[in-house]
Image (cartoon, rainbow, N blue to C red):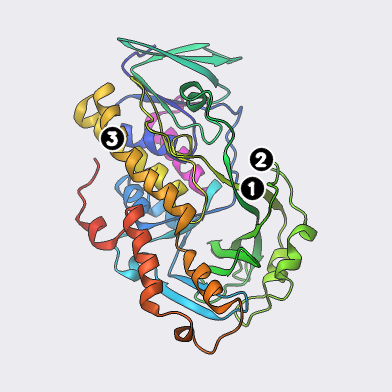
Amino acid sequence: MNDKQVIILGAGIGGLTLALSLHQAGIPCRVYEAVPELKPMGVGVNLLPHAVRELTELGLLPQLDKVGVRTKESIFFTEHGQLIFQEAAGEHAGYGWPQFSIHRGDLQTVLLEETLKRLGPDSVVCNHRCTGVAQDAGGVTVHFADAPTVQDVRGAVAIGCDGIHSALRKQLYPNEGAPRYSGVNMWRGTARWKPFLSGASMVRAGWLAVGKMVIYPIRNDIDAEGHQLVNWVAEIHAPQPAMRDWSRAGRLEDFLPAFADWHFDWLDVPALIRASDTILEYPMVDQDPLPRWTHGRLTLLGDAAHPMVPRGSNGAGQAIIDARFLAGALKDLGVGTAALEDYDRVRVKATTNVVLTNRSNPPDAILREVFERSGGKRFGQIEDVVSRAELQAISDNYKRVAGYDPVALKARASYL
């Protein structure tokens, strides 16, 4: 056992990015994952330029281009299909890095394959469910239940990257309670579909009171006819949350009526939904921000640290940034408590701002403003309802909060 290495609990996006970043920094580590076998799961995610910058510094841009879609624009419509607001995305907006729309399973596969390639075939160990972590002056001891090999592992520090149901978070905050329901249920799916709009557009349409959709392609040219794999999310206000089962099948009759008339010249939304192979349903939840993640030689990362409602395309991105910042701190300050405290000092505040802004004023607040001011009715032109400057201010404010203001992002030094 190597009591100098970093123990990473969880082989999701955050945990694997941390492993690759520590390897880049010359720091030994090993990843322990609870599931018996890692399989591509989930649906679409967006990687904004601040996250893609970090993956580019890891040398992963060619792999992302093979499996994802470089997003060209972010575009907002009413529930009547009327254009509200449009702005360029990624390098099309002057960033030094693209924005990607990508299948979560494809992203995780890229990270896993590169981890096994660079760190070795034994760098990720499955079927090891953490039940607790003890620490002393010299390091940490991680305990696993029913592990096929070792029951305890010794390391210098332990990082909980094990998601919203994190065992380490529960150990550190045993009385926290269940995730906080936002009042919105979500249905998600993917469908084989012809390219729409630019062929690389991220669309938000409608509003929660009547039904809201988020739609974007996540794979190109999936067949000989040039179809894309298109990801969609339907969101509706609901007093009772769906069961918190991330593989729970959704039923068309529970949400499709809200979108039955969404036949637009740029997309037939109900037809897209009906064309989906699988539909999943789950509640939109987060957790109140924690006062601190680091406790001695233990800390949290990604959804284990700051689960957020998915209204700003920032869950995966903030986990990636956590990983890169933490790896930089461990490189600069040594593998010990000083680095974890520095990480805590910076990243808790930054992600708290994102979690709270996702609740109150995320990018789709653009849709809210137009719906409330128009009463949900058709209008002649958007300037009759709200100025473009006001809508741009909502978008620009979120960029600042989430850390991808283009000027600041370009000026910021690399974490590693």
Instruction: Please identify the dominant SS of the magenta region.
Output: helix
Residue 357 placed where, x, y %?
42, 53
- Cα separation, mark 3 vs mark 1, equals 31 Å
State the residue at coordinates (52%, 35%). 163
Q: Quadrant of residue 3?
A: top left
Queried whether the magenta region covers residue 313, the answer comes back as no
Residue 176 placed where, x, y %?
53, 29
Precedes in sequence: disc 3 or disc 1: 1
Write down the region rendered in magenta: 106-125
Precedes in sequence: disc 2 or disc 1: 2
Residue 373 placed where, x, y %?
52, 76
State the residue at coordinates (65%, 58%). 237
Asked if marks 2 and 1 touch (Cβ < 8 Å), the reply is: yes
Badge 3: how crowded within 10 Å, few (<14), some, or many (20+)? some
Q: Disc 1 marks which amino acid?
A: Pro
- Cα separation, mark 2 vs mark 1, equals 7 Å
Asked if marks 3 and 1 touch (Cβ < 8 Å), the reply is: no
Asked if marks 2 and 3 touch (Cβ < 8 Å), the reply is: no
- Cα separation, mark 2 vs mark 3, equals 31 Å
State the residue at coordinates (28%, 62%). 406
From what the image shows, is residue 48 above or below residue 104? below
Tell me the number on the disc at residue 141. Answer: none
Q: Quadrant of the N terminus?
A: top left
Tell me the number on the disc at residue 244. Answer: 2
Count of numbered tags: 3
Per the image, the residue denoted by label 3 is 345
Residue 399 shown left or right of residue 304 in the figure: left
From the viewer's side, name the closer residue of 261 and 191. Answer: 261
- State the SS at label 1: strand
Q: Disc 3 marks which amino acid?
A: Arg
Residue 76 placed where, x, y %?
51, 72
